Image (cartoon, helix red, strand yellow):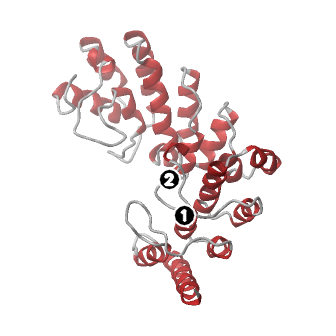
Amino acid sequence: MRDIADIIVQQAITAIDSGKTAELMELIDLHPDLVVDRLQNNDDGYFKNPYLLWFVADNPIRTDQLRHNILDVTRSLLQVAKNKAPDTYKYQVDYTLSLVASGRVPRDCGVQIAMIDLLIDAGASPNAAMVALANGNLDAAQHLVDRGDNLTLAIAVCLEGKDDINHLAALASEDEKLTALATAAFYGKANMVRRLLETGVNPNGFPKDNSGFHSHATPLHQAVSSGSLDTVKLLVEAGASLYAADKIYNGTPQGWAAYLQSDDSNDESGKRNFGLIKKFLYTSEEAH
């Protein structure tokens, strides 16, 4: 296993980032372990010991851009990985798809859908719609469903597949309904939140760790983060806890609103919305 700081590894990553396909292929021809073995790093997160192929997604963000020929670079890497690493190829390509589907850079560079198609055509399973949704990539989620991912209640709600929601809700478990509620709240879809609440779902609790969605926060936390006061009101009126603490920051929904109101990455309109949400939650607490 090569260390990610290895000069050969760094040259290969730089070739990917620079769009230098010929240089990258020459390096792999001399050092085939670059696409066979995982690269050792000190990351304990989702990018721990990556394969070289994973770098095409720029997720986690390293350069905040993708070269104009990233599809050609990816295609060449896929071909050599398939030939030289047949035992791990499926895992490599599946995980690359999840990185592309969840990434901001592929979306902002306008190549996310094309990369998804390239990876699926190369053998990746299209099962990444939920991770796309969890990272704000609605178009990617819709495309993945169109390419064969399973349509769940949470996905249908976020894509507003109205013809599917009643059928899926009737078959869904309480945990699945809660996950759907959290995803709808995350996107501030008050109409979908209302529809789910009408099914009798309990607005309190956290999505399961294996749900594919953020399991650290309640639907009310997610509604706050969306900036939708209407969604927040619906959940509070349905009995959502005003005092539940999220599992990472130990913050209440009102605490989230206060933080987001003060966050300078939000524009003035967003800050006003978070201020209104904070005021509503404070008033609701006083009423209790």
The reply to whether dot 1 and dot 2 touch (C-beta < 8 Å) is: yes
User: Compared to 203, does 129 lie above or below?
Assistant: above
Residue 93 vs residue 71, the one in the foreground: 93
> Residue 127's x, y, as percent?
58, 33
> Residue 98's x, y, as percent?
49, 36
Q: CA distance from mark 1 to mark 2?
A: 9 Å
- Which residue carries the number 1 mark? 222
- Which residue carries the number 2 mark? 214
Answer left or right for 129 relative to 105.
right
Answer left or right for 288 relative to 66.
right
Answer left or right for 104 relative to 116.
left
The disc labelled 1 sits on which kind of residue?
Gln
Classed neighbour count for the residue bearing mark 1: other residues with Cα under 10 Å, few (<14), some (14–19), many (≥20) = many
The disc labelled 2 sits on which kind of residue?
His
> Residue 30's x, y, as percent?
24, 12
* Residue at image point 29% right, 17% down: 28
At mark 2, the secondary structure is loop
Number of marks drawn: 2
Reading the chain from its start, which is encountered first: label 1 or label 2? 2
